[in-house]
Amino acid sequence: MAKLVFSYSHVDEELRNELEKHLMPLKRLGLINTWHDRRIIAGTELHGEINQHFDDADVILLLISPDFINSNYCYDIEVKHALERHAKGEARVVPVILRTCDWHDLPFGKLMATPRDGHPVAKFSHVEDGFYEVVQAIKAVLGELGAGRKSSSSAVSTSSQPATLSSSLGHGPRSSNLGIKKEFSDRDKDIAKREGIQFLSRFFQNSLNEICERNPTLDQDFQQKDADSFEAALYNKGKRVCHCGIWRSGSDMGFGDICYSQSGVSNTSCNDAVSLEDDGIMLGFRSMMGGMVGPGRGSLLTNEGMAEHFWNEFIRPLKF
C-alpha cells in the first residue's frame, strides 16, 4: 500500500476534500492511504509531524494554486522537501493544478502535471471531470511504483510492533471522510451570484475578441447594460448570426439566479437559466432548463463551467 501525502494551501481545503473523495476507490482497493495536516492532533509539534509524513510518503501531491505559491510554508518548506525526495528517487512528486496560476517556471514546473496539459481542475465545466483525470494519473504512478503488488509482509511486521498511545493516535488509520456539511450564509450566496455575473461578462468579452481575431469575417458587439446584465452579438460578413442577453435575475422572477435569452435581456422570458445551489461542500450553479448534456449533467457548475455552457449556446448558430 502506497502512502500519499497532500501539500496544499488551506484556502484550497474544499477542493482537497473533493479530490480525496475521488481517491476513495483506490483506498477501497487497498492501493493507497492518505495523509494531510488536518490529521495532526492537538499538542503535536507541527513541523516535526509534517516532516515525518513527508519522509514516509511514496507519492506527494502538490495542489497548485495562487494561494499555494503564495504560502511561504508550502513553497519554501514542503515543496523543497518533496523535490529533494523526488530527486533521490525516494518518492514521486505529482503537481495537481487546482486553479489558474503561473507555475510553469517554478521548480516543480519541470514535472509532468495533472490534469492533462496543466488544465486547472477549477476550469473544467464539471470539476468531477478534472478530478477523474487526476485519479487516472495517480493510478498510472502507482502502477509504475508497483504499489498494488507490494507484499503485505512489511505492513504485518509493522503492525505487530507495540505502539505508544501517541503514535497510534498520530499515525494510525483513520477515515478520510471527516468533512461535515457546510452552511452558506445569504451573504456568501449574494457574493457568489455577483461574482458569477461578473465572470460571465469578462468571459464573453474576451471570447468575443478572440473569436473575431481568429476569424476575419466576424465582428462583435458587446454592451454592458449595468452591473448585473449585458448583451453580446456576433456578425458574419455584417449579418448578425449570434445574439444573447445574460442577466442576474431577482429571486421573485422565478427564472433562476442568472438567465440567458437569445432575444437579449428581458424581464418576461428566457431560454436558459442557472440557479445557485450548494452540495454541502461548495457553492455552484445548476442548469434549470435541462440543456446540459454528457456525464456531468445535473452536477454543480463552476463559474468557468457556467460560462462555457452559455457560450456554447451563444455560438451554436456558427457550428451548425
Image (tube, rainbow, N blue to C red):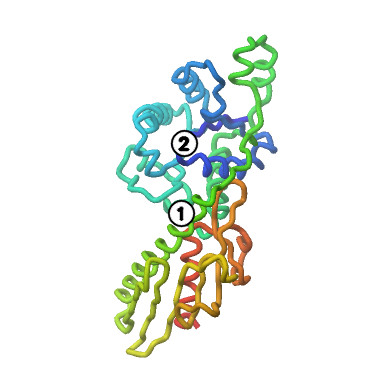
Residue indicated by mark 2? 10
Residue indicated by mark 1? 191
Query: In this view of the protein, which residue sits in the foreground, 34 or 277?
Result: 277
**Contact check, label 2 and label 1, Cβ < 8 Å:** no
Residue 273 rendering spot, x and y as whole percentages: 55, 70
Q: Residue at the spot x=31%, y=81% of the render?
A: 219
Q: Identify the mark nearer the N-term, 2 or 1.
A: 2
In the rendered structure, the answer to whether residue 213 lies left or right of residue 94 reads left
Q: Residue at the spot x=59%, y=34% of the render?
A: 146
Q: Crowding near pointer 2: few (<14 within 10 Å), some, many (20+)?
A: some
Residue kind at label 1, given as amino acid type = Ile
Residue kind at label 2, given as amino acid type = His
Q: Residue at the spot x=46%, y=39% of the render?
A: 94
Q: Residue at the spot x=48%, y=25% of the render?
A: 54
Query: In this view of the protein, which residue sits in the foreground, 301 or 260?
Result: 260
Q: Crowding near pointer 1: few (<14 within 10 Å), some, many (20+)?
A: few
In the rendered structure, the answer to whether residue 239 lies left or right of residue 17 reads left
